Image (cartoon, rainbow, N blue to C red):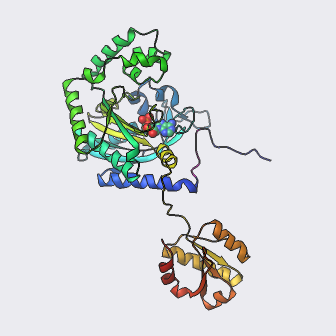
Amino acid sequence: MPKIIQRPRGTQDILPIDQKYWRAIQASVEKVLTHFNFGRIETPMFESEDTFLRPIGQYSDIVEKEMYEVKRLSDSKDPDEGNQRLVLRPEMTTAVARSFIENGLLSWPQPVKLWYFGPAFRYDRPQKGRYRQFFQYGFEIFGDASATADALVILAVWQILSELKLDHLAILEINTIGDKNCRPKIRKTLGDYFKNYTKELCADCQRRLSTNPLRILDCKTVGCQPIIDQAPTVLDLVCELCKNHFRLVLEHLDDLDIGYDLNPRLVRGLDYYTRTTFEIRAKDDERRQSSLGGGGRYDELVVMMGGQSTPGIGFAGGVERLIELMIDRGLKVADRTEPKICVVQFGQLARRKSLVLVAKLANLGYSTVAAFDKDSLNAQLKYANRMGVAYSLIIGQKEALENEVIVRNMSDGSQETVSVKKLDEVLKRKVKQ
Ligand code: AMP
């Protein structure tokens, strides 16, 4: 017997039974972002590695450990790509920025607002909430440097969570990490502080001392925590302009009644961020194991990628993490595709009529099931019960000849015979769509 093939570790099959969550999330994302006039963008699932390397940062976990290379099976080089390596996208912001530059979106009226929903790929140790292929929804605003844009992005996240009835379960953490003017001073001050503890820091943080001391603030290693706790606060080190920007963002959040926790250690792992950084986490995730989403301002990103200076701010959230939260909290999500009606037939003529009936029901907008290869009435009614339909429409030889169906209520077994012509009317009365 051939060996059973399994999906790769850290990936998931999304079966029909789970689609309702995906649909609910995508519908909420689309609804809210359309209200705020974001347009959908889709970029390729693989890109040249340059799209990600420099903006995300050579020493980030993503670039150092988590990217997948895409290659043809044949060893020979791809003449279209030269020496350029192709990788599966580990995130979308940089890919969207690449597209913004490549498609000349700077010539559009600014700000340009874009949203996306699709898979991203990162090599990681698979566990609950952490996959090698996972879906992100996210959105970006290019060409708006105002603090109001930062607050609008957070407002949109909040509205999406509220559409999904998850807003009361979530917490917003926010920080500022300075811009290109004050960042060198921040790095130096933190670097000088952490150098006093070189020996006590974990190996990763020792490396971060020379690559980016700001990242040490983000370290989860137990031994580093007391040292980080005593470190200078970034908010005290940022320049007046950055401080002022941050104050304005917080004022907007107050106006919008969106609560927040200031988290001075929130630096986020990617190099392209400037000024505002924020993360959303579930209230009971105190150990900050699995954030629901995160974002921030990236005023240098477009320049870093070879475009003309364009400020930007965005957010990306994890779809699986939202779904897991919905399931953990027992949130009910309606399944629009649950079948309402089962078509049951016996006899050759009835079978022919049954397919015409299925077509008619589909046109009327009813989700229908049928087990055409079962002959016995009992077997088909059993199937109808297992499928959880409210009504079965039964056609036997007599009904087929007289253009009628028997409408059977599956919960109490009551039946009435109805002419096919009147069926629409009868179903409208009986079946909730
Ligand atoms: P990041 O770009 O790392 O801030 O990711 C944004 C969001 O994507 C996170 O807050 C998570 O919700 C989600 N996410 C990131 N990595 C994974 C992963 N390996 N598996 C599932 N979700 C993820």
102 inside magenta stretch: no
In depth, the one of 40 and 168 nearer the eye is 168
Q: Residue 358, how many percent across, how many down?
A: 58, 75
Q: Position of residue 40 (x, y in %)?
A: 37, 51
Residue 145 seen from this side: no
User: Image check: 342 left or right of 157?
Assistant: right
Is residue 211 or residue 86 the one in the foreground? 211
- Vertical arrangement, residue 41 with respect to residue 78, above or below: below
The answer to whether residue 13 is magenta is yes
Q: Residue at x 42, y 42 (%)?
A: 317
Residue at (47, 79) in percent of width and height: 428
Q: Which residue extends farthest bottom?
A: 402
Residue 152 lies, with reference to residue 195, above or below; the image says: below
Outermost residue on the front side: it is 412
Magenta residues (range) = 10-14
The part of the image, by quadrant, that contains residue 237 is: top left
Question: Would you say 415 lies left or right of 373 here?
Answer: left
Image x and y of residue 297, in percent: 30, 34
Q: Residue at x 31, y 42 (%)?
A: 154
Whether residue 57 appears in this view of the structure is yes
Q: Residue at x 50, y 35 (%)?
A: 87
Residue 17 or 284: which is nearer the viewer?
Answer: 284
